[in-house]
Amino acid sequence: FLSYTMPPRPLPKPNIRNDQRSKKLLYGDLQLHGYPWSTYSVGFLHLFFYTVGAICSYLSLVFLLPPIPHHPAVLACCGILGWSTYCLWMIGHECYHFTMATSQFLNTFIGFLSMDCLVNSQETWKVTHTLHHRHTLASDPQQDRQRLFGSCILIETANIVYTILTYWASDVEFFLQNPSFSKAAALVIRFSLYSFLPANIFLSFVFFLAMWSNYAALLTHAIPVFPKEEQASTSTTTTAGAAPTKHELVVLHQLRTSIDIFPQSPLCLFLFGGLNCHCVHHLLPSLPRSLHSSGTRNIAKLYPEEYRHVENVPELMALFILRSEVFVTPVLIEDLPRIVRERGLLEFLKKISMDVGSLFVMAAVVYFAPPISIFKALVAGGALLEVVE
């Protein structure tokens, strides 16, 4: 499935009116919303399956299955709910980039349902995501927390959970500063949905959501290349040998801090929520997901020595092993398996054992969590207060 590639597809010509704002061309990408409706069909098809997966798994966990997290059916539903919630979150990400539909109303409406009501608000997204695109992998973590932090799965999971909690705090702050019905509705829906899940099931869902967020989205920012200052002036030149312009430096920074994973695979496009082509997204942020594969071919032609993309399982495994590494000189993805072998078996086993140990710790946390939901706990607490009074 991973080796299957999409057939070449030319970028359609948007319908641009003369009175619209300037095009801002970047390798065929138009910062406008004029692609024909057929271009967005893939995104809506994916949205349908994500929504069905989320609804079915959620209802099963709340009404049908026992609150036993190690039960195979419960574990499967938690995994599906975590994955589908992540993918719906990424649908919201596309909506607020205005790449989900041609209609601004549709983008805003779908984004509200898939992002504001599930994970974080549009206002929080605008603040954090603008920083992420302008200062990708900035040295200050508070500028860009959309990255992997830590040396193992446990620490990385804790960090993404902390990041989401900061988003929630920001959502509440934005609501208090400028209250509105839509903000209140989003907060009520979000917290109500999660309050009906038993605590142990909720934690299992959170861990799955965190891992999908980390290793389907943030893994694409792994192994960044940050040249030392003395190397930057000599290693960064244009094809003509001249010093690069400010725009070219920005493009080069995105190429060296973002990766595409199986960019021609429609299965990965579906499973990764459209973010497997993350380098393409950073360079062509107005490109709908159905055109990501075409965008990768354009970038590969323009920057064959800098464009980084994973094309086979050994490269993906090596990327996962080396995900916490930072390089000072450009490194090719095809060289990652060799780098892992050169590090030796002991280093490989150390990394794997830390990740496996992380999974055991997370499983223990879920296992010992109480099988009662926040909603039931509040009801029981209210009844107890009535009895006491």
Image (spheres, grey):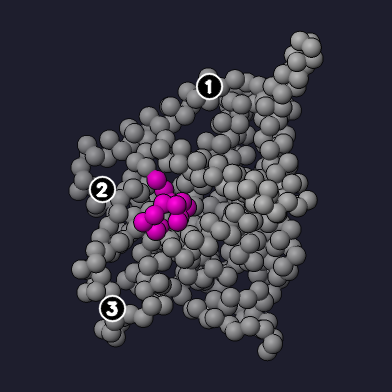
Q: Quadrant of residue 226?
A: bottom left
Q: Residues within 10 Å of mark 2 (few under 14, many from 20)?
A: some
Secondary structure under tag 2 reads helix
Q: Residue at x 69, y 42 (%)?
A: 190
Asked if residue 114 shows in the view, the reply is no
The residue under label 2 is 340
Secondary structure under tag 3 reads loop
Say above or below: 31 vs 161: below
Q: How crowded is mark 3: few (under 14 residues within 10 Å), some or many (20 or more)?
A: some
Q: What stretch is highlighted in magenta?
A: 137-149
Report whether 373 appears left or right of 161: right
Q: Quadrant of residue 97?
A: bottom right
Residue 93 screen position, x and y as percent? 60, 57
Residue contact between numbered discs 2 and 1, judged by CB atoms under 8 Å: no
Label 3 is placed on what type of residue? Thr
Q: Which residue is drawn at 64% across and 66% down?
A: 98
Residue 364 screen position, x and y as percent? 47, 23
Say above or below: 108 vs 177: below
Label 2 is placed on what type of residue? Val
Label 1 is placed on what type of residue? Tyr
The residue under label 1 is 367
CA separation, marks 2 and 1?
A: 34 Å
Query: Could you tell me what secondary structure mostly forms the magenta stretch?
Result: loop
Q: In which quarter of the image is the C terminus?
A: top right
The residue under label 3 is 237
Which residue is situated farthest in the bottom direction here? 18
Residue contact between numbered discs 3 and 1, judged by CB atoms under 8 Å: no
